[in-house]
Image (spheres, rainbow, N blue to C red):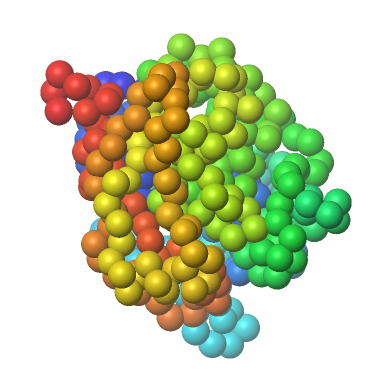
Amino acid sequence: MKNIVTIGGGTGSFTLLTGLKKYPVNISAVVSMADDGGSTGVLRDELGVLPPGDVRQCLVALSESSETLRELMNYRFEGGGLKGHSFGNLLLSALEKIKGNFAEGVEEAAKILDIKGEVIPVANKDVRLCVKLRNGEVLSGQSQMDHNEKVREIGIAEVFIKPRVSAYKKVLDRIKKADFIIIGPGDHYGSILPNLLVSGVGKSIKKSKAVVVYNCNLTNKKGQTDDFDLDCYVSEMEKFIGKGRIDFATYNIRRPNKRLLEKYEKREGKNSLVLLKKEKNNPGYRIIVADFLQNAKVVRKKGDAIFDTRSFIRHDSEKLARTLMKIIEPERY
């Protein structure tokens, strides 16, 4: 079986892994440690733990345990002192305390959930994402990107992490042994780049012999990726992993329905769909064009305090995985 390393976080990784786990591949999911919003942010601040939210989503995506146990991991309390917290976040934080470090706690949770493959935090130390605006002001915290209006009004110049930390050793080992490295989909500044900013990750991908696939986002975000087209995203990725390092890029060709698009554009501005510009005859990577759009409506879950900041134009897990397997094993799929 092929060794697959995925790099991302949040809903994007959940979508990708939910589809990929149905195929005969060895999956190592590398997950961002920058999240500090909602339940995760409260637990980080009050308990001094590493962020469990994105890891929880990946564990649930890869879990082959009962539906009840997977639902339990995502269950959010609706009232009392635990309001807004998910059971899974609390479990991961408790396991971190019991085992003495987050990475070992995640491994224990993986056993409990009987996951296919493995979920690995990109770093096993506390790290914060910092956002530098175009006017030079610096904001601390990944959650600032969705909750601070300055981001939307002024725009992001760059992001960086503090303190500078090295990648968890197992991450570099898996990248070295990978046959395919799949980056995204996911929030560009909030979920993808925080992995590549960790010391050692970008360099390891650059040196790896693996085929690199980039799953381009469906939409742009106001103040963050305004007017980005596919090539802009690829160019941004390659600043960290080496020019020409991306071999394939997937691009969604299907437009969302008019009502959903109008709802999205009301929040993020007009013309927010990522475009496929064809100025370059030979961009240096192969573009895989297909319908990747999720048909199902995104439903608000009770107790989800940050639902309004979540994307409701999303990739479909089965469509995405099916296309990726045609790249991974073209002779079979």
User: In the rendering, at what x and y percent does residue 286 appear?
Assistant: 35, 24
- Residue 306: image location, x then y, percent: 55, 72
The residue lying furthest to the front in this view is 279
The residue positioned 59% from the left and 60% from the top of the image is: 222
User: Residue drawn 48% across and 42% down?
Assistant: 229
Residue placed most toward the observer, 248 or 49: 248
Q: How many marks?
A: 0
Regarding residue 151, the answer to whether it shows in the image is yes
- Is residue 180 visible to the viewer in this orientation of the structure? no
Rendering coords of residue 168 (x, y %): 63, 31
Task: Answer above or below: position of 185 versus 144.
Answer: above
Residue positioned most to the left? 332
Q: Nearer the viewer, residue 291 or 282?
A: 282
Left or right of 109 in this view: 125: right
Q: Nearer the viewer, residue 266 or 110?
A: 266
Q: Position of residue 39 (x, y in %)?
A: 60, 68
Residue at 31%, 21% in the rendered image? 2
Q: Is residue 329 left or right of residue 32?
A: left
The residue furthest right is: 136
Q: Nearer the viewer, residue 285 or 71?
A: 285
The image quarter in which residue 167 lies: top right
Name which residue lies at 39% across and 22% down: 281
Query: Which quadrant is the C terminus positioned in?
Result: top left
Image quadrant occupied by the N terminus: top left
Task: Say whether residue 252 is left or right of residue 193.
Answer: left
- Give the answer, above or below, for where 152 lies relative to 246: below
Along the horizontal axis of the image, is 77 left or right of 4?
A: right
